[in-house]
Amino acid sequence: MGRKFVVGGNWKMNGDKNQINEIVNNLKKGPLDPNAEVVIGVPAIYLAYVKSIVPNTIGVAAQNCWKAPKGAFTGEISPAMIKDVGADWVILGHSERRTIFGEKDDLVAEKVAHALESGLKVIACIGETLEEREAGKTEEVVFRQTKALLPAIGNNWANVVLAYEPVWAIGTGKTATPQQAQDVHASLRNWLSSNASPDIAETVRIQYGGSVTAVNAKELGACPDIDGFLVGGASLKPEFVDIVNATQ
């Protein structure tokens, strides 16, 4: 199989320089599993600062970007700017962007396409709400969101990580059971095999994001189709190191 485990820490709108120093020092102390890739998603205003203090072995991601290199888009940042300060990743289509800021599948796809064209690596998020899950629409929603990404990604899959995040399990303390998460990951991989290619389905890394903690990370990480985590609140805490090391 050989998919490298990848753990993203999405700080969301959290942190000041003191807290950031603590988090980074904690990551430096580790020790972090050398076989896991680690990427931290940082508020835009701190991207350059974090890049200046974090070890080169840890990737730095913006939490969002716009779909153009520059222009009259007050408050936005472009992939070119993200690269200019030394960061190499961006998180796109996060459920909070979709639900709070109303980002639709086609906009997320345009952003993904531009970020990849600009040379950034992308964590592309997909996932269903509680209403959608209870209506039995999990696969329908996840496949629809992924389908929108296919033309945007093209043959650039090597620079994409998919993050499956059940919206109902983010910040709620509810977690999909390892079996629930594995089932969605497996059916998504199966869908990719039919709709993209068997090779893409086999090689693309699919993270799980939804209230991952040091307590449940080992069991989730042992599932064959879960290739890592996108971690929210726990990425601000010392336990993030244990989550990174979940498959050791």
Image (tube, rainbow, N blue to C red):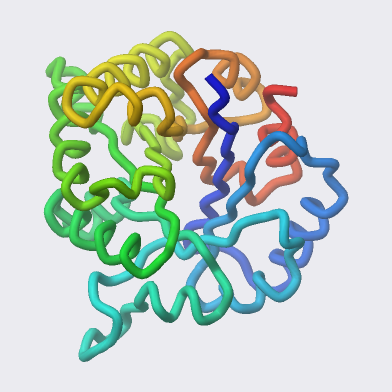
Q: Is residue 172 above or below residue 27?
A: above
Total numbered labels: 0
The quadrant in which residue 169 appears is top left
The quadrant in which residue 247 appears is top right
Identify which residue is drawn at 51% across, 61% down. 61
Q: Is residue 6 above or below residue 12?
A: above
Identify which residue is drawn at 57% across, 38% down. 6
x%, y% of residue 104? Answer: 14, 53
Identify which residue is drawn at 75% across, 71% down. 53
Q: Name the residue nearer the viewer: 127 or 206.
A: 206
Residue sitting at the far bottom = 72
Residue sitting at the far top = 179
**Image side of residue 130 versus residue 20, left or right:** left
**Whether residue 206 can be seen here:** no
x%, y% of residue 100? Answer: 25, 55
Quadrant (top left, top right, bottom left, bottom right) of the C terminus: top right
**Image side of residue 69 versus residue 139, left or right:** right
x%, y% of residue 94? Answer: 33, 49
Identify which residue is drawn at 28% across, 56% down. 97
Q: Is residue 132 above or below residue 135?
A: below
**Whether residue 36 can be seen here:** yes
Q: Name the residue nearer the viewer: 120 or 207.
A: 120
Q: Name the residue nearer the viewer: 218 or 3.
A: 3
x%, y% of residue 89? Answer: 48, 60
